[in-house]
Image (tube, rainbow, N blue to C red):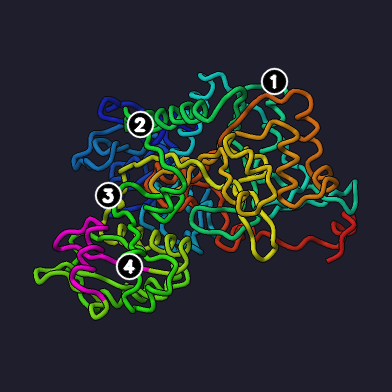
Amino acid sequence: MYRTHTCGELRLTHKGEQVTLAGWIQRIRNLGGMTFIDLRDRYGITQLTVNEDSPADVKAIAHTLGREFVIQVAGTVMERSSKNAKMPTGDIEIAISTCRILNAADTPPFTIEDESDGGEDLRARFRYLDLRRNPLQSALKLRHRMAQEVRKYLDSQHFLEIETPFLIKSTPEGARDFVVPSRMNQGEFYALPQSPQTFKQLLMVSGYDRYFQIVRCFRDEDLRADRQPEFTQIDCEMAFVEREDILQTFEELAKYLFKNVLDVEFTDAFPRMSYADAMQYYGSDKPDIRFDMRIAEVTDVVKGKNFAVFDDAEYTGGICVQNCAGYTRKQLDELTEWVKRPQVGAKGLVYIRWTDEGLKSSVDKFYTPDDLTRIAARHGAKQGDLILLLCGEKKKTQEALGTLRIEMGTRLGLRKSGTFAPLWVYDFPLLEWDNETQRFYAMHHPFTSPKPEDLEKFNSNDKNLLAQVNANAYDFVLNGTEIGGGSIRIHDSKVQQRMFEVLGFSPEEANYKFGFIINAFKYGAPPHGGIAFGFDRWCALFGGQETIRDFIAFPKNNAGRDVMLDAPSKIDEAQLKELGLKV
């Protein structure tokens, strides 16, 4: 056998035992008559020693070793004279009696250490080396643990894990599909699934009333820290349920994961918030409620005071930043420039400082002390606080204030890692109007049910009434990140056909793209609903990170490329000819 023990399990209780280890050389320290070798595998590091009394062949081999060599050693477990309390194996070392090089290694392009000297691009090119580092190994161990715990919980709740196809029909409604040409049906294409949405609904029609899958999904969309072209979701569906059944079932899943993975216990129910309140008070449909700093509207207070910027604006609102009245003019000018960035989109910033001298504003000449007092009262401000105001079109200004709120929370250290604030957000708009195409789009997807009390509006042809229809949908938010989203689905074929009509599909187009599910509903579809959680995002948040990349073994970069494989890449003419394609 190559090893009797791993490099992370030996302790003083093994003292005097003959053992065999195998792994990679982390580092070598040659101190003249004594050589220390740190041997690493995914379980830990064990110190090996070569000294004057070691066999001649061992000493000879030791002089040829380098970092990341793969070796096998046998020897005796000894108590270390100089113990290392930072290492689990720090009380022992192995006096080597035999050493065999299993594979020599070139010097790696960066150090395989917790804090590497390799840049992100370099480490991505050599991902198989980067994966040897502790932070990534810990991330993937966490991912594995979470996957196992998800399966345990859902199995205990009688969910069946059922696989669905990866080669499906393209239905470009939402994100862009990745398409796959068919060799046997030239000129026709499969699509990779953005989610198993229709299949899990068909499973409900088929009588499998509790389904789940930890499934790979694909979306051809622009990338960011928490988004990849291929990602994993915990996909779930239940039949004979209402919204409350879904929320309770998956709130218990979240609590189970917090307890069994992080040893964090939630005894109270998670807070809930409507979409309208989330936008009004936080400027985001995924608010971070680890800190307060709510948005307050002051449109009625600031209008009609001859300050054209506020007078002409549809909406004016602000946030109160506690204990920041001491911000200097330089700091406030920097903040003003920050809100003008395209990512925020504001045209400027008005501030009010409550100092020892009273309320002072950047627009003092337009507003009386009484006006400023009313604005401060609306924000719940006190002496020592700073109020930041933005104005413009209502939704855009609320979103800009939400972005500013997150930035100030980050700058002030209010978004603390290791603190978790879960939240359910519900009652999203069902439809979104697009001025460019002059049509409605589904806010979630076209299978989301309108709320029962909004069915009359849903069946009207009044654009304003349709815009007021709420979806029977819900999101699970954690620390300002959307972790999961779902809805009660449409299960009536007439309601489903009406949805396609509202979205601008002709009957023929709807039947071509979705006829299979419309027809399935005619054969006894039960009321059903579900949710899908972004597994990569959930892992990253549990791991205390905002980027998901370290929690995926082989991720893509921000351009959607795998720089290790150099993919995507061109294919040769013979392959193109087989597929009936020309480039």
Query: Circles 2 and 4: CB distance less than 8 Å?
Result: no
Residue range in magenta is 367-390
Residue type marked 3: Met
Q: Nearer the viewer, residue 192 or 488?
A: 488
Mark 3, residue position: 34
Mark carried by residue 207: 1
Q: Tell whether 52 sits left or right of 97.
A: left
Where in the figure is residue 314, as x and y percent of width and height?
44, 67
Mark carried by residue 389: 4
Q: Is residue 406 above or below residue 218?
A: below
Marks 3/4: CA–CA distance:
67 Å
Callout 4: SS: strand
Marks 3/2: CA–CA distance:
24 Å
Query: Which residue is at a point 22% across and 62% down the rendered structure image?
Result: 376
- Sequence-wise, which precedes: disc 3 or disc 2? 2
Query: Which residue is at a point 51% across and 25% down the rendered structure image?
Result: 245
